[in-house]
Amino acid sequence: MAKQKRDKTFELIEKETQRQNDTLQMIPSENYASAAVREAMGSVFTNKYAEGYPGKRYYQGNEVVDELENLCRESGKPALPVSTARLCIIFWTKMGK
């Protein structure tokens, strides 16, 4: 299970890399970091400013961020000893939150 989630995470990183390579977002709060900065920060997600919650973002171009945030939220559920009906996980990263 952990390997599948890790594989899905890397799949989403590749998907976001392709989206950023194929589009030019003119959002002042975002930038395109150099390869050296991305390597230091971990992935192309360091380029993103993703204010808001999945499906309810302020800026466009956050579909893959939504997928990653939802994946992280789902990954955290088994670790918590509460009913998933009452569970609310908010996954905040350095992507503008």
Image (cartoon, helix red, strand yellow):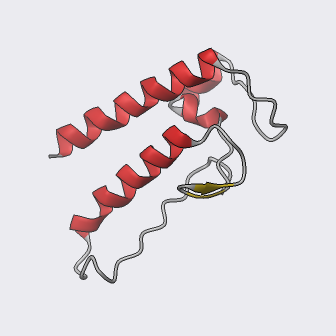
For residue 88, above or below residue 77: below
Compared across the picture, whether 81 is left or right of 54 comes to left
Q: Position of residue 51 (x, y in %)?
A: 68, 55
Q: Choose between 39 and 66: the one closer to the eye.
A: 66
Q: Residue 30: which quarter of the image?
A: top right
Pick the front one: 43 or 29: 29
In the displayed image of the protein, which residue is found farthest to the right? 28
At 19% from the left and 45% from the top, the residue drawn is: 2
Residue 79: x and y in percent read 24, 67
x, y percentage for residue 49?
69, 44
| Residue 84 located left or right of residue 73 | left
Picture mark count: 0
| Residue at 61% in and 49% down | 94
Q: Seen in the image, is 85 located left or right of residue 62?
A: left
Instruction: Classify 66 as above or below 9.
Output: below
Which quarter shows the C terminus?
A: bottom right
Horizontal side of residue 81 vs 61, given as left or right: left
The x and y percentages for residue 26 are: 81, 30
Depth check: 41 or 16 in front? Answer: 16
For the point 55% across and 55% down, the residue is 55
The vertical placement of 3 against 70, above or below, is above
Against 89, residue 62 (above or below) is above
The residue at the point 61 percent across, 16 percent down is 22
